[in-house]
Amino acid sequence: MVKVSFLIVNWNVREFIVPCVKSITVNTPPEIAIEVIIVDNASTDGAREYLPLECPQAKVIFSEENLGYGRANNLAFENSIGEYVFVLNPDTELVDSSWTKLVEVLDAEPKTGIAGPKIILGDGSVQKSSARREDRMGHCVLYEVMGLGKLGLVQRNNLQMQSTYYPTDSDLYVEGVSGAAMLVRKEVYASVGGFDPEFLHGGEDTYLCKRCLELGYRIKFVAGAQLNHYHNRSGAKASVKTFVKSLDSRYTFFRKVEGSFSAFVYRLSVLVFYCFRLLIVAIASTLKRKSDSSERWDMYRAVLVWCLTKKRP
């Protein structure tokens, strides 16, 4: 009997994690043995009381500090015994037993190291990162930093150096799947050292996928395996610090994958375009003779401090 260890990191998401854990139990057929391991990242919503009571089927590890997504998953992995580990966000929910198709793929394909499902968002759309290509610095600068895609000047599928997404209507081998839900062979997770803790917010799943490919394994997107992801409802707008952490993680990824020069170009591009944005906000505030853009001021200042000082947020 195959055993799957579910690794879940919790931080103040009581309304989601309890249904998530229950959905695992309800939607797992008897021929698959499971264990659920939750690492609580120093939650402040009473997790020490409610998790043991409302998720009695789970092994819960309470951390005295917020370890971050990567380190917390690695801690859960260290305490797992399954031959496959299912990294699962706490704001997801298994809707049926179709997730077991991921197990079938890894059972049937020894050289497939990671399998990912089709992730359905709260509005019914497919999460694009369910089947993705590796991030490229050039695309990131043009599409995300400069925002040309939003202006209709640059389309993702027109760029050769882009980070773009695969179609999600059929099974296919991809460069990466989303860290919100991925089934990983235990030996692959161990061989790459798990999630790289240097990533502060995002990017650790993309980097883990890249290292899986470097080991000679494949990554497969499985269209028939589906689950729900409520991340667009699971919290307020990201804080300034969280946003800067995401920039830092992008920088870290490009430094590790494309080299120091590529990372430098990315940081310089962020500096130039956020200086421009800050100037626009300043002019607009002057013309209005009032400042109604304090949030943007805080955001842009924080970004510029990160660009100029290289201090990690």
Image (cartoon, helix red, strand yellow):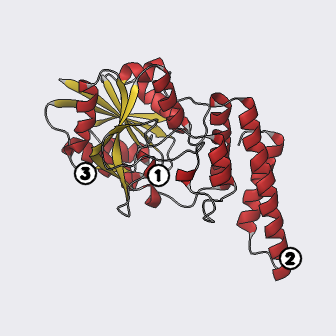
For marks 1 and 3, give the one nearer the viewer: 3
Residue 52 image point, x, y percent: 33, 41
Number of numbered discs on residues: 3
**Mark 1 or mark 3: which comes first in sequence?**
1
**Residue at 50% across, 22% down:** 214
Residue under label 2, please give it: 286
Q: Quadrant of the N terminus?
A: top left
State how far apart marks 2 and 3 are (Cα): 52 Å
**Residue at 49% across, 33% down:** 72
Determine crowd level at label 3: few under 14, some 14-19, many 20+ residues with C-alpha closer than 10 A. some
In this view, 313 is above or below 197: below
Residue under label 1, please give it: 45
Q: Amino acid at mark 2?
A: Thr
State how far apart marks 2 and 1 are (Cα): 42 Å
**Residue at 57% across, 57% down:** 155
- SS for callout 3: loop
Q: Quadrant of the C terminus?
A: top right
Q: Amino acid at mark 3?
A: Val
In this view, 204 is above or below 194: below
Residue 10 image point, x, y percent: 44, 43
**Residue at 75% across, 68% down:** 294
In this view, 231 is above or below 293: above
Q: Amino acid at mark 1?
A: Asp
Residue 93 seen from this side? yes
State how far apart marks 1 and 3 are (Cα): 26 Å
- SS for callout 1: loop
- SS for callout 2: helix
Question: Which of the 4 image quarters holds residue 117?
Answer: top left
Residue 113 image point, x, y percent: 37, 26
